[in-house]
Image: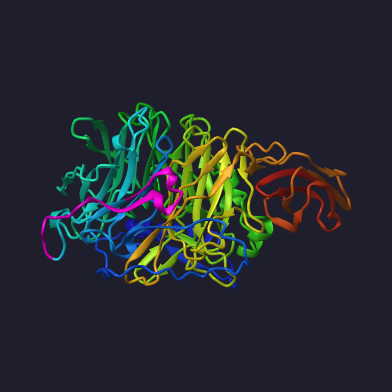
Amino acid sequence: MKNFLLIIFAMMLALSVVAQRPRIKKGVFFRNCQREEPVVREPVEKTSFSPVASVHHRANNGDKPNIVTVLDLGTSASVFGYSRGTRTMVWADDNLNVVVNFHRMGPGSTPPALSGYLGMDIGLNMGETQADWTTQVQAYRANLAAVPDYYDACRYPSAALYNPAGNLNPANAFLAFFAPNYANLIVSGFGGYSFGTANLVNHADTTKRLRWYDGLLYTNIPDGFTISGAGIAHMVDLDMNIESGTPSYQDSVIYGRGPWNNTTKDFDYTFRKIAFPCRDAVPAADCKIAASPDGNTVWMSVLTNYAYGTPLLDSTYYPLVRKSTDGGLTWGPPIPIYLGGPDGIAAIKNQYSDYFIYTLFGQPVPSRDEIPYTTAFDHSISVDKWGNLHIGVAVGYAPGAYSITTGVDSLINIYDIYTINGGASWQGVFLGHLKTFRGTWGNYTSDNRTYVSRNKAGDKMFFTWNDTHMDGEVNNQDPDVFARGFDLIQHKLTSPDAGMDASTVTFLCDITQEAYGQCTSPIVFTDNSRFTLPICTQWFSDATADSRFKYIPDFSYIQSDFTVPTTLMGFDEKTGELPGVAVFPNPVKDLANVSMDLKLPANVSFEVTNLIGRPVLIQYKGNMEAGNHRFSIDAGHFSPGVYFITVRANELKVTKKVIVE
C-alpha cells in the first residue's frame, strides 16, 4: 500500500510540474525540432567523379559586382563533407598568411581518392585569389582492406595548423588532424581514431597513427580539436559506449593532450577521461575545446544537463564547462551555465518583449524566470587574451524532451555567452535573430552552425552562422552566411546590415542562398585595423552526389565598423537594470505618468502586475527613437493596493512600485 501511494504521489507531482511549464498557445505555428540521432553508419555514398558545375541563384544587381568573391576549393565524395556540426575544419595562421581547409576527399584528386581519405586545400597569401590555392592534397590514405569499408576509413575530421614559435616559412609548418574511423570493425560503426600530421609544402611528409576501440575508452566521434599557442594539441570526444549499436553517454569526455615531438613531426598524445555528468540517460549533444592565445588557459565545454545542478527544466541543454590554467595538465570542477531561471543570464531572459511573450503563451503570462531555454545542439568556443571563455551558440525556447521550438520568427537567437572573471559569473550578448533552424537535403541535415573566432591578440571575437531569410520559408533550406564582430575592449558590436541584426556575408554572391554548412577559422587574419574572416562553405546541386568546397577571401571588418554599444544607458549586464525611468505621481488615483530617457533606439514595452505577480495590464509600445518619452497608465481601473510597473527597452528593464489609492 505504501509503495502504491508513493507511485500516485510521484505521478501527481510530475503532472503538476508539467502543468506549470509555459506552453505556446494554440494558433501560433511552431515546429518542434529535436536533437538529431547520433550517426552510427552513414547511408551508402554515391560517388560521382564528374566535375561539380555551379548553378546558383545569382541576384540581378545591374553592373554592381558581387559583394564577396567565391573561390573553388577541393571536393568531397558526398554532401557529408561538412556534416556533424561545428567541428574545426578551417584554420588560418596570421603569421604565415596561410589558410587550410581540411576535409574528406572526392573527385579531382590524383590518384582518385575514396571518401575515407582525407585531404587539404592550402591557400597562400591569405588565399586571396584562385592562383594562391593548391587543392586536393592528400594527407591521409585508408589502406587496411575490409568489406564493405576499409578498417581505417575516416569521416568527420578536425584539423589545426601547428606553426613553431617565430617561424615565417610554411615549409616548417604542419597541419595536424584528428578523425574517427571504423574501429577495426570491432563494433558497428565509428569508434577508432585516426590522427597525424601533414607538411604544408612537402606533401609526402605525413604521419598516420591509429587507435582502435578497446572498451577502456569508448572512443566515438571527436567534436573538439585545437592547437594552442604553446604548441600543445588538445582533443575532446564524448565518451559513448556504442557496443549495443545505440550510443550510451558515460558522463565524461575523452581528453587527448599532445605536446609536439620535433623528432617524429607529430604530437605525442595521452588520453584520459574527464567527468562531465549528465542528469539522465540522454547523451550530451556536443563538446568543444579552446585555448587562450598564450596556451596557458584551456576551456572545455559540453552541451548537456548537469546531474547535480538545479536547472529550470530537467530536459534542456546548456553549457557545462571546465577550465585548466596549466595548459591542460589539471582541470577545475564542472561549472554549469544556466540560461533561464533565477540564476539565468539576464540578456537571455530579457530577449523577448512582453508583447512577444503574451502572443506566444497567452494567459496566464509566465514570468521571465519561468520560461525554460535551451541551446541548440552544437556550438563553438574561443578564449580571449584574458583567459575568459566565449561560447557562440543559438538559444531558444525549450518545450521539453531535449528539443527546441522552431517556426516562430525571432524565437531562437544567436548569443555570445561569456565570462569576464574566469567563470565566477556569466553574461550574454545578443548577436542576431534566426528565422529558421535546420536544413535537410536528402539524408544530409545541417543546423545553423554557429562559429566563434578571434583575432590573434584575443581582444576581438567574431561570430558566423547560417540562416535562411526568405518570406514563407520555415526550414534552413536556402542558407546564407551571417556574421557579427565583438570588440571586447570597447564593448561594441559591428554594425548590422539594413533590415538585419548582422552582416549578410553571402548576399548577392555566387553562392547566395546556397552557402551550405559553413565553417570559419578559429583565428582571423589581422592587417592593422582590418580583420578578415576565413570562411568556407560547401556547395552541391545533388544531395546524393559529391560536393565542392568554396572559400570567401574578402569578407572583413575594420575598426570603425564596431559602432553598436553592447550596453544601453550604462546597462550592467549582471543586473539588467534600466536607469532613467520615473513613475509619478505616486501614490496615484487616476493617471500614472511614466517617463524614460532612451540614449539609443529601443523596442519598448511595459506590464503592470499586482502583489502576487499576476499581470493586470500589458502594453507594447514598439520601436521608439532615442530621446525622452512619456506615456500614461489609467490606474483608475485598478483596485486600490500595491502594483509593480516593469518597463523594458530591448534587453534592459526596471521595475517601479506604485500605490493606487
- Percent of width and height locating residue 576: 65, 41
Q: Residue pushed farthest front?
A: 131
Residue visible at 18% across and 34% down? 264
Specify the quadrant of the image occupied by residue 189: bottom left
Can residue 609 be seen by looking at this rendering? no
- Percent of width and height locating residue 90: 38, 48
**Nearest the camera: 82 or 24?**
82
Q: Is residue 490 left or right of residue 524?
A: right
Q: Quadrant of the N terminus?
A: bottom left
**Would you place residue 377 above or below residue 457 in this image?**
below
**Would you place residue 421 above or below residue 653 in this image?**
above
- Percent of width and height locating residue 328: 32, 31
**Nearest the camera: 623 or 136?**
136
Residue segment shown in magenta: 121-147
**Nearest the camera: 354 or 639?**
354
How many numbered circles are shown? 0
Residue visible at 36% across and 68% down? 52
Q: Is residue 91 left or right of residue 139?
A: right
Can residue 481 be seen by looking at this rendering? yes
Q: How is the image coloured?
A: rainbow
**Nearest the camera: 341 or 461?**
461
Specify the quadrant of the image occupied by residue 26: bottom right
